[in-house]
Image (spheres, rainbow, N blue to C red):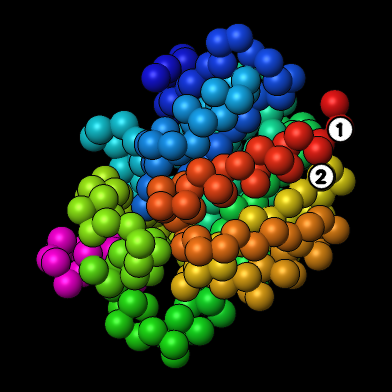
Amino acid sequence: MSRGKGHPHCIVRRATPRARGRPLLFVHGAFCGAWCWDENFLPYFAGLGYDAWAVDLRGHGVDGEEAGFASIEDYVEDVLAAVAAIGEPPVLLGHSMGAVVVQRAWRRARAPALALLAPVPLQGLLGSSLMLALNSPEIYIEINGLQNSTGTPAAFARLQQAIFSDALLAAEARRHLRRMRNESQRALFDLGWPQQPWIEPAEIPVKVFAAADDRLFPPPALEETAQWHRGGMEILPGTAHAMMLDVRWREAAQRIADWLDELPD
């Protein structure tokens, strides 16, 4: 792990040797931290020859720090600071909330490409929340209570249903859920509304990776995002929202690696 002066905390897994030209910067979603990438994705992509970085958005990784009233634009500034620490424009890969952050950051970061993993839909959280409330009210209640989760077995079980596949061992799901932190209420408010006013259609390659079994943002809700950027969408079978931690993470990582291989030099 490394922390540069004036830069946010990052976890870095360097390739030995570096065989790929572009570094990768992974940006986590709400309640998580850079740790979620280091479980599987960072070592995997370093093994393929990429320098793989994951940034802790403010208040998400370092002990004693809290997100407070941070906005999505504050998180964009964290990503830009991480890009400065890398020293060259990386491919940006954002998950869920982090996908919104990288969509706002790509031009200032001079990113060569964007991967959007289970992104918050362009219409914002409000529409997705209403659909979840209608289809799975018990999960909707638990997701909204994540800020003050009691850590009861019932709460963990419902949260596991929301973001992991049924195939993931309950003990593994609980281990990940215990590492999650409170999210900034301001950031969640920023995500509640349609995102188009703040997101510019990209002039770089964009790929949306949707999880087939995502109960938060199912694939049909993400088609607009792919169309907005004139990019493609790939649906990952047997995969839930937290694809980097789920049992089929390796398949998801391989599909992303295949896309990276297709990018122009």
Which secondary structure, mark 2? loop
| Residue in view at x 31 percent, y 31 percent | 62
In the rendered image, which residue does mark 1 sit on? 264
Name the amino acid type tagged 1.
Pro
Q: Is residue 264 left or right of residue 59?
A: right
Please report contact status of discs 2 and 1: CB closer than 8 Å, yes or no. yes
| Residue in view at x 76 percent, y 34 percent | 261
Magenta residues, start to end:
144-156
The crowd level at tag 1 (other Cα within 10 Å; few <14, some 14-19, many 20+) is few
Residue 150 colored magenta? yes
Q: Is residue 87 left or right of residue 224?
A: left
In the rendered image, which residue does mark 2 sit on? 205
Give the mark nearest the N terminus, 2 or 1. Answer: 2
Above-or-below relation of 174 to 253: below
Residue 22 visible, this angle = yes
Residue 37 colored magenta? no
Q: Is residue 225 left or right of residue 69?
A: right
Q: Position of residue 28 (x, y in %)?
A: 48, 45
The crowd level at tag 2 (other Cα within 10 Å; few <14, some 14-19, many 20+) is many
Q: Is residue 240 left or right of residue 150?
A: right
Q: Position of residue 120 (x, y in %)?
A: 57, 63
| Residue in view at x 50 percent, y 68 percent | 214
Above-or-below relation of 88 to 93: above
Magenta-drawn stretch, dominant element (helix, strand or loop): helix
| Residue in view at x 40 percent, y 64 percent | 165
